Amino acid sequence: MDIEGAEAKALAGARAILDRDHPNVLIEIHPDMLRERFGASADGVVEEFLGRDYRMFALTGAGIEERRSVVSGVPWKDYFFLHPSRPLPDGPFAALMRN
């Protein structure tokens, strides 16, 4: 999802799908746009996933980092939310999910 601050609105409409299908999601989170345009928060978006047992990852200069909150001090960033019930092909995410 790359929807310029409407992440919380999209997730509100997708709750049934998240609960039923546990899709893996790549989402660009814009904390300022969430707050200014929609009165929502990055923490709320993250909690939509973590509250459903998803794991959150971000790409950094050092590789893939597991997180429980958004990176501070950046206007936006892409995050991967992966559910442990979804199989992944071999690779860095699959290895992290086994831990």
Image (cartoon, rainbow, N blue to C red):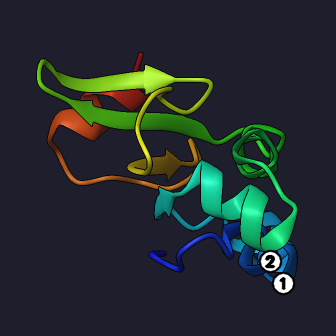
Report the Cα–Cα distance between label 1 and label 2. 7 Å
Q: Residue at x 53, y 80 (%)?
A: 3
Residue type highlighted by circle 2: Lys
Where on the picture, by quarter, is residue 17?
Answer: bottom right
Residue beneath disc 1: 13
Q: Position of residue 10 (x, y in %)?
A: 73, 80
Q: Is residue 39 or residue 16 the one in the foreground?
A: 39
Q: Residue at x 51, y 23 (%)?
A: 67
Q: Residue at x 39, y 48 (%)?
A: 77
Q: Is residue 44 left or right of residue 75?
A: right
Task: Quarter of the image for the C terminus: give it.
Answer: top left
Disc 1 on helix, strand or loop? helix
Is 27 drawn above or below residue 70 in the view shown? below
Which mark is drawn over residue 61?
Answer: none
Q: Position of residue 50 (x, y in %)?
A: 73, 38
Within 10 Å of the Cα at label 1, are there few (<14), some (14-19), or many (20+) other Cα atoms?
few
Across the whole image, how many numbered discs are drawn on residues? 2
Q: Residue at x 52, y 36 (%)?
A: 56
Residue type highlighted by circle 1: Gly
Where on the picture, by quarter, is residue 46?
Answer: top right
Residue beneath disc 2: 9
Circles 1 and 2: CB atoms closer than 8 Å? yes
Q: Is residue 51 left or right of residue 29?
A: right
